[in-house]
Image (cartoon, grey):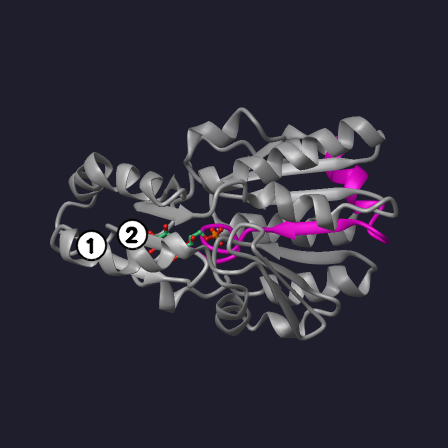
């Protein structure tokens, strides 16, 4: 299913002109951090087919040339996103992968060690999975995908009856997402990434995401803006209502987000 534009989504300009202008007029030293799936790239059935929407990479390149630090903060493996997205053309890009477990910068990847429980679950889970559910192995985390099952929601309900217990037995955590259950080591979230990315020199901060896993990053940017008094702007992309009350702006789709990012260059 593609992200759909929400009919009732107010235009970003009407919602938060001050925050938009605040970030746009402090691009030198600004952090522009964005999630990948559902934010830069529309949601698709097969994750290997995700691609950023037309024009957004060129806009991120222009924002980087204007002095912003561009970061992609993703649940994906950093190198996978780099390849899928054609992101290496963005000057100075940082990719924070697998919910803060990895950092890719200047062609080098730093990464935490694989948790031992992951290896147990990569063997234990496959024979237990309902028809049509597949396991994405990102080494540092595992993701159970139900989008390709005949009834994705009922497959998710089935998984929720036993997966969280098996995962907890390995000292790991289960996190929900868009037709996925993500299994990862405890204490990791996109806030880990934001804490590294927001430095004393950061002049303004922008974060956009589409799913529950983006809430910690949204909270980190909101907190940073309050604590520093510098401009911060958080954006939810799409329909997940839990995000809408936590952000400054809601846009309907990755294409709308791309237009919003281009708007920062004009401010
Ligand atoms: O933090 P993100 O960059 O948004 O990554 C979150 C997960 O994204 C991927 O799954 C989601 O996108 C798929 C492709 O559009 C879609 O098929 C799936 O239903 C979505 O949940 C990715 O496969 C996961 O590893 C990421 O954790």
Residue drawn at x 60%, y 51% as measured from the top left: 34
Measured Cα–Cα span from mark 2 to mark 1: 7 Å
Q: Are marks 2 and 1 in contact (CB under 8 Å)?
A: yes
Q: Secondary structure at mark 1?
A: loop
Q: Position of residue 174 (x, y in %)?
A: 37, 41
- Of the pair 93 and 162, the residue shown nearer to us: 162
Q: Position of residue 198 (x, y in %)?
A: 76, 45
Residue 195 position (above or below residue 230): below
Residue drawn at x 20%, y 54% as measured from the top left: 133
Q: How many marks?
A: 2
- Of the pair 211 and 182, the residue shown nearer to us: 182
Taking the image in four quarters, ligand 1 sits in the one at bottom left
Q: Position of residue 177 (x, y in %)?
A: 38, 42
Neighbour class for label 2 at 10 Å: few (<14), some, many (≥20)?
Answer: many
Q: Which mark is residue 133?
A: 1
Q: Is residue 188 in view from this perspective?
A: yes
Compared across the picture, whether 13 is left or right of 21 comes to: left
- Earlier along the polypeptide chain: callout 2 or callout 1? 1
- Of the pair 171 and 145, the residue shown nearer to us: 171
Q: Is residue 63 magenta?
A: no
Q: Secondary structure at mark 2?
A: strand
Q: Is residue 43 in view from this perspective?
A: no
Compared across the picture, whether 162 is left or right of 112 comes to: left
Mark 2 C-beta closer than 8 Å to ligand 1: no
Q: Quadrant of residue 46?
A: bottom left
Residue drawn at x 59%, y 31% as measured from the top left: 247
Q: Which mark is residue 144?
A: 2
Magenta part of the chain: 18-43
């Amino acid at each position: 299913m593609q992200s759909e534009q929400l009919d009732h989504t107010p235009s970003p300009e009407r919602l938060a002109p001050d925050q938009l202008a605040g970030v746009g007029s402090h691009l030198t030293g600004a952090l522009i951090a964005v999630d990948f799936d559902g934010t830069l790239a529309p949601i698709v059935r097969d994750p290997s087919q995700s691609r950023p929407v037309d024009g957004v990479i060129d806009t991120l390149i222009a924002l980087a040339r204007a002095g912003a630090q561009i970061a992609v903060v993703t649940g994906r493996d950093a190198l996978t996103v780099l390849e899928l997205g054609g992101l290496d053309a963005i000057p100075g890009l940082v990719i924070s992968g697998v919910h803060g477990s990895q950092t890719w910068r200047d062609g080098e990847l730093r990464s935490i060690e694989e948790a031992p429980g992951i290896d147990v679950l990569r063997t234990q889970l496959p024979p237990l999975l309902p028809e049509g559910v597949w396991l994405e192995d990102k080494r540092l985390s595992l993701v159970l995908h139900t989008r390709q099952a005949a009834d994705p929601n009922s497959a998710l309900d089935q998984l929720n009856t036993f997966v969280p217990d098996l995962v907890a037995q390995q000292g790991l955590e289960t996190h929900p997402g868009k037709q996925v259950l993500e299994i990862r080591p405890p204490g990791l979230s996109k806030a880990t990434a934001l804490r590294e990315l927001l430095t004393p020199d950061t002049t303004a901060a922008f974060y956009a995401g589409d799913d529950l896993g983006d809430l910690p990053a949204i909270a980190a940017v909101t907190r940073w803006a309050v604590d520093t008094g510098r401009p911060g702007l958080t954006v939810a992309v799409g329909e997940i209502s839990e995000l809408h009350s936590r952000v400054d702006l809601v846009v309907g789709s990755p294409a709308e987000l791309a237009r919003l990012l281009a708007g920062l260059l004009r401010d």
